[in-house]
Image: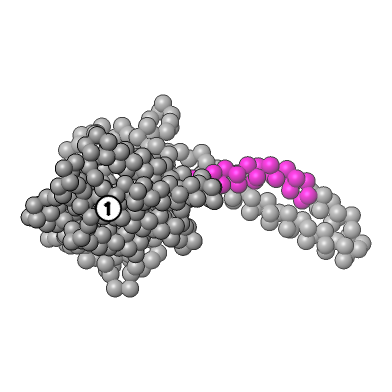
Amino acid sequence: MPPADTELAMLRDLGRRNRVRLKTQILLRWIAVAGQTAAALVAATVYGLVFPSGLVAITIGAAVLANLLAAFLLPATRRLSEGEAAAMLVFDVAQLSVLLWLTGGLDNPFALLMLAPVTISATMLRLPGVLLVSGLALVSVTVLWLWSRPVLSPQMVALSLPELLRFGFWLALAIGILFIALYVRRVTLEMQAMGDALAATQLALAREQKLTDLGGVVAAAAHELGTPLATITLTASELVDDLADRPDAAEDAALIRAQAIRCRDILRSMGRAGKEDTHLRQAPLEAVVREAAEPHLARGRDVVFAVGAEPGSGAEAELQPLIHRRPEIVHGLRNLIQNAVDFARGRVEIDLSWTPEAVMVTIEDDGPGFPPGLIGRIGDPFMRSRRRPGYEGMGLGLFIAKTLLERSGARLSFANGGDRLRASGDAAGGAIVMIVWPRETIEATDAGTAPNPHFLP
C-alpha cells in the first residue's frame, strides 16, 4: 500500500529541510574573497592597471564583514532557511556587481563569475528564490554592459572591448544565466524527486517487513500465553464445581472459564497466522502472486489467473517453481496489481509462466492503457503515468513497485495491448506489465533461503 498521507507530506517536505549549512556558504564566500583580493593585487602590482583600489578594497571588505558577522552571530552547523539562503545569494550578486562596475564591467573577463550564484540558487532555492537571484543577475549584467568605470593601462589608456564583442559577451552571459537557472533547477528537482521516492520505497519495504516481523511476535506470544491460559481454564472449571451451592459465584467462574477459552482460541488462530508469516519463507509462484493480489480481489473487477509453463519448455519445467516469499516481491507485485485494478474497466488477467531459465508474471487490464508518449518514462517518481477521471496519483506506487522488483533481480517492461489477444482469447487492449526474473535469482532451492544477493535493503 502507498505511504500514509502524513508520511507523504514528510517526504514532500524533505527537500525543503535539506538546506546547505551556513558553514559551507561561509567557506565558499571566503574562497571568493580570496580570489577577488588576489585578482585585484595582481592587476595593480604585476600589470600596473589603474582602477579605484580604495573602493575595490571597501567592496571586498563588505564581503569579509558579512562573513564575520554570519560566523559570529549564527552557529556554523545551522542550515540556511529559504529566506536566509536567498538573502546571502542576493548579497553575493550585488557585491560582485559593484566590484565589476568598479573594474571595467563586461570588459572584465571575471564577469563570468556572475553565473556562480545563479547556479547555487537553482540547486538550493524554490522557484521564487531562483527567479529573484537570476533576475537580479540578469539586470546586473545588463547595467554592466551599458555603464561601468573603465580600467586604465599604465599608459592611462582605457582597456575596453570592441562594442560588438561587449554585446556578444552580454548576450552570452544573459543566455547562460537563463539556461543554467532552468537546466540546473530541472536536474535538481528530478534528483529531489528521486531521493524522496527512494525514501518512500524504503518506508514501504520497512512497513512490509514490520508486518512480517509482527507475525513472529504474535506466534511467540501465543506460545508463551498458552500455558497460563490453560491453567486459568482448569482452575475456573474447578471453581465452577466447588461453587455449585453458590449460583452467583459459580456463574462468575463459568464466565472466567469461557473468556479464557475464547482467549486461547484467538491466540491459537493468531499463532497459526504468525507462524505462517514467519516460517513460510518460500511458496509456489501462484501462492505468492495470489497473496499479493488478495487485497484487490473484491474490488468489483474480475481478476483471472492463468498458470502454466511456457510451451516447449520441456518436461523438467512442468512443475511450478518454488520461489522466495520476500516482502519486497509481494509488495511490488501488490502495487502493480492495484494499479491494474484501479484502471481496469472490468477485467484483469495475471499470467504466470516459466521456462528452465526464467520466471514470468504478466499483469494485463482492459482499461485505457498507458499514454503512448509516456511509456518510456513509466516508473519515474511523481509522474502521473495513467489518467482517469477522478483519479489522483503521483506515479509513486509504480516507482516503488519497479524499484523493489528490480532489486529482487527482476526486469520490468511496460506496453499497451492493442489488438493482441489474451491467453483467455479476449482482446487485450489495456496496459501490460511484464516482470521477468532469472530462475536462479528467485527460485528457492533445497540449500536454504538465503537472502537474494541482488536485493540491497
Look at label 1 and name its amino acid. Answer: Leu
**Which of the 4 image quarters holds residue 319?**
top left
Tell which of 306 and 187 is nearer to you: 187
Which quadrant: the C terminus?
A: top left
Q: Residues within 10 Å of mark 1 (few under 14, many from 20)?
A: many
User: What segment carries the magenta color?
Assistant: 209-233
The residue depicted at 33 percent of the width and 73 percent of the height is 390
Residue 212 in the magenta stretch? The answer is: yes
Residue 352 at x, y percent in the picture: 28, 47
Q: Residue at x 14, y 57 (%)?
A: 171
Residue tagged 1: 102
Q: Is residue 443 visible?
A: no
> Which of the pair 345/332 is nearer the observer?
332
Q: Does the stretch in magenta take in 199?
A: no
Outermost residue, right side: 245
Q: Main secondary structure of the magenta part?
A: helix
Find the residue positioned furthest to the bottom.
390
Q: Quadrant of the N terminus?
A: bottom left
Q: Nearer the viewer, residue 347 or 170?
A: 170
Q: Residue at x 31, y 32 (%)?
A: 440
Report which quarter residue 342 is drawn in. bottom left
